[in-house]
Image (cartoon, helix red, strand yellow):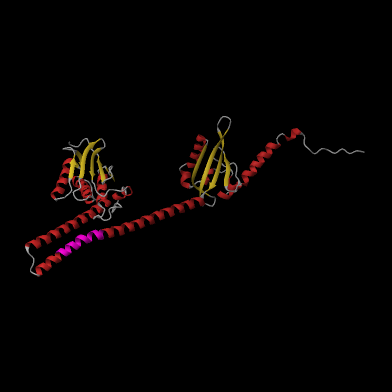
């Protein structure tokens, strides 16, 4: 007798839905297994529909506790009161996807920094029927970034403090060196006059010579003190401009006349209009022109010509001072406008390196610019000042 065994395999029509069911099951298992991301669905009104193990780990709610609740419970109170959760749903509905970072609240009330992606799921008519929400806990990364930022701020503050100390030391060194010379000259001249008087050899000529030396040293001290006061006032912005219609051409001629009266050996050649009106602070602009011409003569050999040119251009009034001195190297072009800045080839020249810094500050406050460059012919330096003109100023 033969025995017929029943075939356990299902008929083909019974398998119709199995592959799809297995795919959906596999996907659900995959989502649920993800531990580093909270992945869940919201209904159109923002109520939680699904919950994975990553969401439970990050937010602290079990599926039974959270499903059916509104997702606004994850937001800090002030954002809930401001209606931010529903605004984010609206943005996701409008754009299809919206990403946000901010503080979120766990079940125990603790906060964490979250990166959130909301994606609208639409039906055939394009209406959102649910929202997929993926949340990642970035608290540790944010803490590391903040620590890095704090470290960078600390490093910059330390570097600034170190630079301030270097600037202070540089100032003390330069100021001491520059002040020492006129002080020593005053002291030596005074001692010489005292000795001559004690020896009964203090005639009129010796007295005149000694007093002349002392006056020159005192003038030098006065100039140094004025420079230091100017730097202090400009740095503290305690030197407001006294603007008035200013004939820059007349001002430049007055400055050059003073240098000629002092018996300078340099030839100063001026080219410019008879009149050029600008809005300016007469005393401060006088200081700029004086500094530039004094620099040109200081860095040039005796009797070398200094060319001063004033012109009216589209950019404004343009003043150029050209010398035939030791020149200006490219590496020093920016540094010379810093406090105590000096060119590489100018270390032996007397001065604290404040004149150009003061001039740059004054010109900037007039809304203008000042630049320095080597001369195009390779001999000496060129300084160019541009000052804006006001059409309402008297011409």
Residue at 23% from the left image edge and 52% from the top image edge: 230
> Which quadrant of the view contains residue 51?
top right
Say which quadrant the C terminus sits in: top left
Say which quadrant the N terminus sits in: top right
Q: Looking at the image, is 126 positioned above or below residue 287?
A: above
The verdict on residue 120 being magenta is no
Residue 86: percent from left, percent from top: 50, 40
Q: In screen coordinates, is 191 left or right of 334?
A: left
Name, please, the residue furthest toward the right: 1
Please report the bounds of the magenta region as a residue range: 175-189
Give 271 or 76, whichever is nearer the viewer. 271
Name, please, the residue furthest toward the bottom: 199
Give 163 or 262, whichever is nearer the viewer. 262
Q: Looking at the image, is 72 positioned above or below residue 170?
A: above
Give 281 or 57, whichever is nearer the viewer. 281
The mark total stands at 0
Question: Is residue 309 visible from the viewing direction of this image?
Answer: yes
Question: Is residue 111 visible from the viewing direction of this image?
Answer: no
Residue 336: percent from left, percent from top: 29, 50
> Which quadrant of the view contains residue 211?
bottom left
Residue 282: percent from left, percent from top: 18, 45
Q: Looking at the image, is 211 positioned above or below residue 260?
A: below
Residue 67: percent from left, percent from top: 59, 44
Q: In screen coordinates, is 133 left or right of 269?
A: right
Magenta-drawn stretch, dominant element (helix, strand or loop): helix
């Amino acid at each position: 007798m033969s025995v017929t065994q029943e075939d356990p395999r299902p008929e083909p029509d019974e398998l119709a839905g199995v592959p799809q069911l297995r795919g959906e099951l596999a996907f659900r298992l995959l989502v649920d297994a993800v531990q580093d991301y909270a992945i869940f669905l919201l209904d159109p009104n923002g109520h939680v529909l699904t919950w994975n193990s990553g969401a439970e780990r990050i937010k602290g709610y079990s599926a039974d506790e959270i499903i059916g609740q509104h997702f606004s419970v994850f937001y800090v109170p002030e954002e809930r009161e401001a209606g931010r959760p529903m605004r984010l749903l609206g943005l996701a509905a409008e754009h299809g996807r919206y990403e946000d970072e901010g503080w979120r609240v766990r079940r125990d009330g603790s906060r964490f920094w979250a990166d959130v992606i909301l994606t609208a799921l639409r039906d055939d008519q394009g209406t959102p029927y649910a929202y997929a929400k993926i949340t990642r806990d970035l608290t540790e990364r944010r803490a590391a970034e903040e620590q890095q930022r704090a470290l960078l701020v600390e490093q910059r503050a330390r570097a600034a403090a170190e630079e301030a100390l270097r600037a202070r030391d540089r100032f003390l060194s330069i100021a001491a060196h520059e002040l020492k010379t006129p002080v020593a000259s005053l002291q030596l001249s005074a001692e010489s006059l005292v000795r001559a008087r004690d020896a009964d050899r203090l005639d009129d000529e010796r007295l005149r010579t000694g007093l002349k030396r002392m006056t020159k040293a005192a003038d030098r001290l006065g100039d140094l003190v004025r420079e230091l006061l100017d730097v202090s006032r400009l740095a503290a912005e305690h030197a407001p401009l006294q603007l008035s219609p200013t004939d820059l051409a007349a001002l430049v001629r007055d400055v050059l006349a003073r240098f000629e009266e002092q018996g300078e050996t340099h030839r100063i050649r001026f080219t410019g209009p008879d009149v050029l009106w600008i809005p300016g602070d007469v005393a401060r602009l006088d200081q700029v022109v004086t500094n530039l011409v004094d620099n040109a003569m200081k860095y040039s050999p005796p009797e070398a010509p200094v060319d001063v040119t004033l012109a009216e251009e589209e950019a404004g009034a343009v003043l150029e001072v050209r010398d035939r001195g030791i020149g200006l190297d490219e590496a020093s072009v920016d540094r010379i406008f810093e406090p105590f800045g000096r060119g590489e080839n100018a270390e032996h020249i007397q001065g604290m390196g404040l004149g150009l810094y003061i001039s740059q500050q004054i010109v900037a406050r007039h809304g203008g610019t000042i630049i320095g460059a080597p001369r195009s012919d390779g001999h000496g330096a060129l300084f160019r000042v541009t000052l804006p003109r006001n059409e309402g100023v008297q011409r």
